[in-house]
Amino acid sequence: MNMTKKKIFIVCDSSRSLLDFRGKLIEKMQQHNQVYVFTPKIELESVRNRLKELQVITYESKLDGSNVSVLSDLRFIYSLYKLIRAIKPDVFFPYTFKPVIYGSFLAKICKVKLIAPMLTGLGYNFTENSTSNKLIVKITRSLLKLSLKPNPSLNIIFQNKDDSERLIDLKILNKKHQVYVVNGSGVDLSHYNYSKPSTSPITFLMVSRLINAKGIKEYYDAAKLIRSRFPLTVFKLIGPYDSNIDAITPALYQEIASGDTIQYMGQVDDVRPEVESSSVMVLPSYYGEGVPRSVLEGMAMGRAVITSDSVGCRETVNNDPKQANGFLIPVKDAGALASKMEYFINNSDDIIAYGNNGHQFAKAKFDVNIVNAALFKIMQLQA
C-alpha cells in the first residue's frame, strides 16, 4: 500500500502531557508521517530525548496554560501563526484550551486542510455554577465560539458526550459542526500493569494538581473523618502545587503538607510504585474533566475507584452492577466520600473484586490503542 506522508502539527500547553498522554499516539503518527510539536519549555530531559529519538521536530513556547496573561498570549499567537505558515501542516491537532482556541482560529486563516482540536475537558469556566471571574468566563466562551465556527476542515474531538452537549446548550456548537467523541486519552495497559491491590494497611491515593475544583479539600476533610475512627488507614496525595488561578489556599496547602493526616508527596515522575502500594484511587473532582487520566491509570493497575458524579469522572465507573468497579459520590460532599471509604475499609474483599472489574473495564473501553485508532480515523490518517 502506498503511504502518503503527512505533516502533523501538535500544539499543547504542557510538555509533560506530550509523552504522558500522547506518547503512543505520537509514536504511531511518526511511523508514516512527520510530526511537529509546539510545546511550553521541556523541563524533563527524558521527554526531550524521547522526542529526539522519535525524530519529532520540536519548537518551544512560553505559553502559560493555567493563567491569564494578555501579553504572553499575544506572543504565543504570533509565534504559532508563523509556525503554521512555515510548516504548512496537513493535519493540525491542538489540545487543551488555549491551543484549541488560538490554534483553530489561526489554522483556518492559514487554510490548513484538516483541523482536529481536542477538548480534554471544559474545566470550571463551563460548569453550571462556575465561581470563576464572570468576565473571564464570558471571554473564554466567546473566544471558543469564534474559534470553533463551523468550517468544512474542522473535526472537533471531545472525551465525553456531556462536554459536547454542554457546548450545544451554550450555543457554541450547532448541527453544522462535525463532532466526535473518544474515550479520553486512553491508557497504556502494557505500561500500567495489573497488580493485586494492597489492603494492609488500606491506603487511599489521590493524584491531582492541588486546585480547588479537583476536590482537594473534600479529600482532606474525608481523610480526617476516617482517621478519627480508623487511625491505621493511610492517605496519600500526589501532585504539584503551583500558581494556577484555582490553586488551594496557602493555608490549606501548609495544613496538608505539614500535617500527619495525608502523606503529601508532591509531583512524581512515575506514579506506578505508589499506585501499586495503594488500595483505592480517589478523585472527588468537579473540575469539568475530559476523562481523568489518574483514575484510568489506577483502573488499569487494578484499583477500585471513588470519584464524583460529575462530567468526565462518571465515565470511569461501570454502570453494570455485576461489574462494579467503584462508586460515584455527589460533588463537594466530604461526608459521602468518607462513607464510601468506610465501605472499602469494612469490605476489603471488594477492593480486590472492584479493582479486577476496573482493570477489565479499562481494557475494554480505555485501551490507548483503541482510542488512538479512533483518532486516526478522525484525522484521516492511514494506520
Image (cartoon, rainbow, N blue to C red):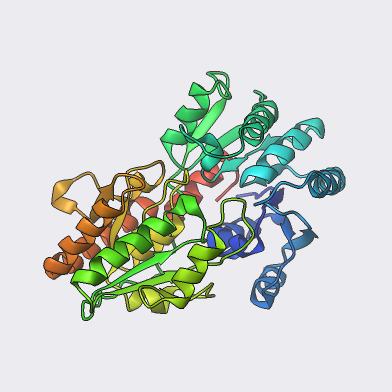
Query: Where is 279 relative to 168, above or below?
Result: below
> In the rendered view, would you say 318 is above or below 133?
below
The answer to whether one can see residue 5 in this image is: no
Q: How many marks?
A: 0
- In x, y percent, where is residue 125? 56, 38
For the point 57% across and 19% down, the residue is 176
Q: Where in the figure is residue 334, as x and y percent of width and height?
A: 31, 54
Residue in the picture at 24% in, 64% down: 355
Residue 219 placed where, x, y %?
36, 60
Asked whether, in this view, residue 355 is left or right of residue 87, the answer is left
Give above or below for 41 relative to 33: below
Left or right of residue 278, residue 69 in this image: right
Q: Position of residue 305 (x, y in %)?
A: 29, 59
Q: Nearer the viewer, residue 260 or 277?
A: 260
| Residue 164 vertical position relative to residue 197 in the rendered view, above or below | above
Which residue shows up at 64% across the image and 27% down it? 145
Question: Which of the 4 image quadrants contains residue 202?
Answer: bottom left
Q: Is residue 39 visible?
A: yes
Which is nearer the eye, 39 or 97?
97
- Residue for point 78% across, 60% down: 60
